Image (cartoon, rainbow, N blue to C red):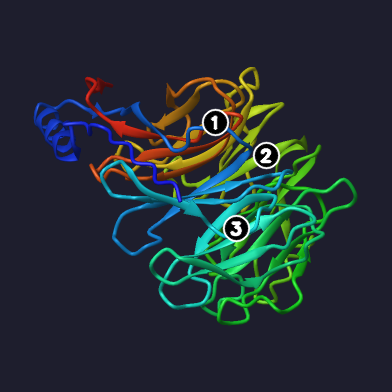
Amino acid sequence: MVCLVITITQSSFAQQDVNALKDKHERKGKDITVYPDFDHSLLLEAKSDTTANISSGDFDGDGHLDILLVKGRHWPILDRVLLGDGKGSIRKVYNLGEMSDRSYTGAVADFNGDGFPDIAVSNDNPDRKLVYFNDGKGNFKVVSEFGRPEWPTRNISVADINRDGLPDIILANRGDSPTLNYICLNTGNGQFNGNCIPFAPYPTTTITPANFNNDGFVDLVVPHRDGGQSYVYFGSSDTSYSDNHRVPFGPSKATIRVAAVADFNGDHMLDIVTVDEYKGVDLYFGQKDQTFSEGISLAGPKIVPYALAVADLNNDKKIDIIVGHVEAPSTVFFNDGTGRNFKKVSFGDAKGTVYGFAIGDFNEDGMSDIAVARSDAPNILYFGNTKSKPRMR
């Protein structure tokens, strides 16, 4: 067992200092926006491999965020668990399980209802898709499976599709032949024994759950990956996600790798942001008639975008956009709240390809940090801090 412990000096400009600075300028009638930088970092591993994604949660119940590195893609590798100490260091590292597999995503949820975060791993063909149960101390054991090993699964997401209080699994599949995506319902105690529900007959590499029409049912954003139309499938009581109950978004020949959902313009309607390696980064606003606007380009494809996350990184209650690239630094698009004006801030190096992000306060200083999964470069954690002078607007 290898234990990786690396310490980092935390920023002295903690969140209380940010708030004090804002209060000072607000009293003087000035509007201030603080943009954190991500200059301090921690290598999560010394070597490079084909890491596909990264997730976080408190796996061992100590109150501090931990990290899951999901590895493999087309080549079987062991997934890894990294336990954090809450101070920006990793105190323990070990394999998630004993099996090397072709993994793309590790979804974290309490699948068996015991109060501890479990992990479902979206393995590609021909590997079984596995659910690891957590004993509450960060020890994981395979107890359940979902879907079929031959499915070309890329990513999974989790939502309570049939409103029974149990987390279900949505599989995004991308194959060379005609492709179906699936919903596997949790039948209780983290078991997925029933037949999975097919929908969206086209290749995709992410599916994002949301509720666009506030009807209480989960809607699913299904971007087309290989040159076709993307759709939002609206949920209903029958959980069928029919082609008759969907609306298009984006171009008719999209090659979208990932989409994310948030209200970027503050109109209380959800919007969709996408990264398309041939088109760039685009934002589609939700409209009152449950359709979506034409795309607003945030960045072109000259620097190839490949990974995406959304979060409020500077604590201004406005959702920002984080984009990872192929052999280029990552970019944060800080949102002014209109969804049309963004301050671009680059961070990190130009090594490898960014495959995924996990956002959280890993050193517990009140500022969000960005954990990055990379292929052909070491995985890394960037710490948000505001030691630099705030920018006025």
* Residue placed under numbered mark 3 in the picture: 157
Residue 271 showing in the rendered view? no
Given the image, on which type of amino acid does mark 3 rest? Ser
Q: Which residue is found at the position 90% from the left and 49% from the top? A: 177
Q: Which residue is found at the position 70% from the left and 50% from the top? A: 102
Q: How many marks?
A: 3
Quarter of the rendering occupied by the C terminus? top left
Whether residue 55 is situated above or below residue 374 in the rendered picture: below
Q: Which of the labelled discs sits on residue 257, or is there none?
A: 2
Q: Mark 1 or mark 3: name the one nearer the start of the chain.
A: 3
At label 3, counting other C-alpha atoms closer than 10 Å, the crowd grade (few under 14, some 14-19, many 20 or more) is: many
Given the image, on which type of amino acid does mark 2 rest? Arg
Taking the image as shown, residue 212 lies to the left or right of residue 314, namely right
SS for callout 2: strand
Whether residue 374 is situated above or below residue 344 in the rendered picture: below
Q: Which residue is found at the position 25% from the left and 28% from the top? A: 386
Near-viewer residue (320 or 115): 115
In the rendered image, which quarter is residue 38 located in? top left
SS for callout 1: strand
Residue 197 showing in the rendered view? yes
Q: Are marks 2 and 1 in contact (CB under 8 Å)?
A: no
* Residue placed under numbered mark 1 in the picture: 324
Q: Which residue is found at the position 31% from the left and 29% from the top? A: 36
Spot occupied by residue 77 in the image (x, y as percentages of width and height): 64, 47
Near-viewer residue (246 or 118): 118
